[in-house]
Image (cartoon, rainbow, N blue to C red):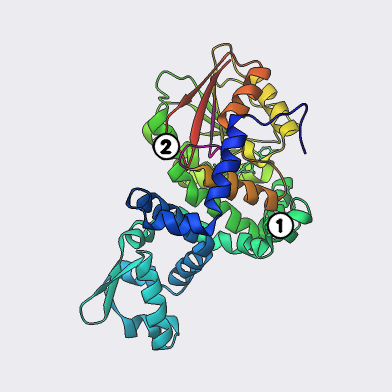
Amino acid sequence: MVDGDFSPGWRERWLLWRNSWLSDPRFQRWSMRLPLLRTTAQRHANAMFGVITGFVYTKTLTAAVDLGIIAACAEAPQSEAELAERAGLAPAAMSRLLAAAASIDLVESLPGNRWTLGQRGAALANNTGALAMIEHHKLFYTDLADPVAMLKRGRGGGELARFWSYAEAAGRGDPAAADDPGTQAYSALMAASQPMVAEQVLEAFDFRGKRKLLDIGGGHGAFLAEVAAQHPDLPLALFDLPPVAAAAKGVLAARGLERVEVTGGSFRDDPLPAGADVISLVRILHDHDDAVVTALLAKVHAALPPGGTLLIAEPMAGTQGAQAMGDAYFGLYLWAMGSGRPRTAEAYRAMLQAAGFTRVVERRTGVPMVTRLLVATR
Ligand SMILES: C[S@@+](CC[C@H](N)C(=O)[O-])C[C@H]1O[C@@H](n2cnc3c(N)ncnc32)[C@H](O)[C@@H]1O
């Protein structure tokens, strides 16, 4: 589809010329031989093969986690025979898997046919958020088995959508859904992956001098618990769907955080609690379509005092160096889930301005792939 009157500019002419060269096998062979071009050509070829074969590495990782290799090697070096027995695999199968896992730096061999963790394995071993994601991705992987069918049938309709519908049904108060393992898994996933996000936000934004923070869609309070640890005197409030809010009360009390004011309600239909001069939306907006986001931003604007602050923390589309995370991973994830879309910081900036926010600045986070942070002032 061509929008409006359109004539190809210099960029389009350059891209077509470049692509005609890159797709020519003679140019490919020639560039591999020419010393000046060889390094760049090899880098591009390696990256392309990484994309073509990436699913094998993901599955190697899944097997290494599921068969307890990462957990066992995190405790102490293991012999190949011990690992095979623990996993219920024939020695030849374990040997093949370990070689594959070593090639992607999950494990490393030691003398005597023993194994310890590789650099990536060591970084993963205690990262409960990443481990929960690996488990959760089994659902996404089922939907992606036929990506064309997934795109043709429209948003949702697969395993991920089913998983999220449990969470939504639990949110609406359906007791069957609340007890469902799918819902439990959802809450566990969110809580396990939250510290990675909270750490980035707390490094990038200073809550000192603020009167009260309201976290909308705060789940079981994992983000507020991290804020409370750094700001013991900052009044805190959480707003989430009634059954989630009820569960949050218990979780927060168990962590000694009875001081967090918890309100149950829907940001679609109910008024937001008043009195906060900072409101946070952590991993909320990308789950929702534009109409819901537009209405929510207007509601947040109305709930804040003049000069009040809104924080939007989530991974975003078009993130330098992490485009694939925003546009490929979250783009397809949210498609499979059935609602929302990854947005660029610029898209949020425009929506925030339309909602009446006067100033929107981005604070740099340490790992923008995990979350970016927009700070909007009413
Ligand atoms: C993706 S989770 C994020 C949870 C938490 N902020 C985090 O980053 O871990 C989305 C949260 O929004 C809540 N939520 C969804 N729809 C909502 C609504 N209409 N009103 C209030 N909360 C809602 C969900 O219950 C869930 O806790």
Marks 1 and 2, how far apart in space?
32 Å
Q: Which residue is mark 1?
A: 177
- Regarding mark 1 in the picture, which secondary structure is present there? helix
Q: Residue at x 58, y 33 (%)?
A: 11
Q: Residue 23 location in percent, x, y? A: 56, 54
Q: Residue 14 location in percent, x, y? A: 56, 37
| Residue 120 higher or lower than 329, as above or below | below
The reply to whether residue 354 is visible in this rendering is yes
Number of residues whose C-alpha sits closer than 10 Å to that of mark 2, classed few (under 14), some (14–19) or many (20 or more): many
| Residue 205 higher or lower than 54, as above or below | above
Q: Residue at x 49, y 34 (%)?
A: 372
Q: Which residue is mark 2?
A: 200
The disc, 1 or 2, on the residue closer to the chain's N-terminal end is 1
Is 316 colored magenta in this rendering? Answer: yes
Position of residue 270 in the picture relative to residue 63 (left or right): right
Number of residues whose C-alpha sits closer than 10 Å to that of mark 1, classed few (under 14), some (14–19) or many (20 or more): some
Labels in figure, total: 2
Magenta range: 311-321
Q: Residue at x 71, y 55 (%)?
A: 161
Which quadrant would the N terminus be assigned to in this image?
A: top right
Farthest residue in the left direction? 111
Towards the viewer: 202 or 10: 10
- Regarding mark 2 in the picture, which secondary structure is present there? helix
* Badge 1 residue CB within 8 Å of ligand 1: no
Is 195 colored magenta in this rendering? Answer: no
- Dot in front, 1 or 2: 2
Which quadrant would the C terminus be assigned to in this image?
A: top right
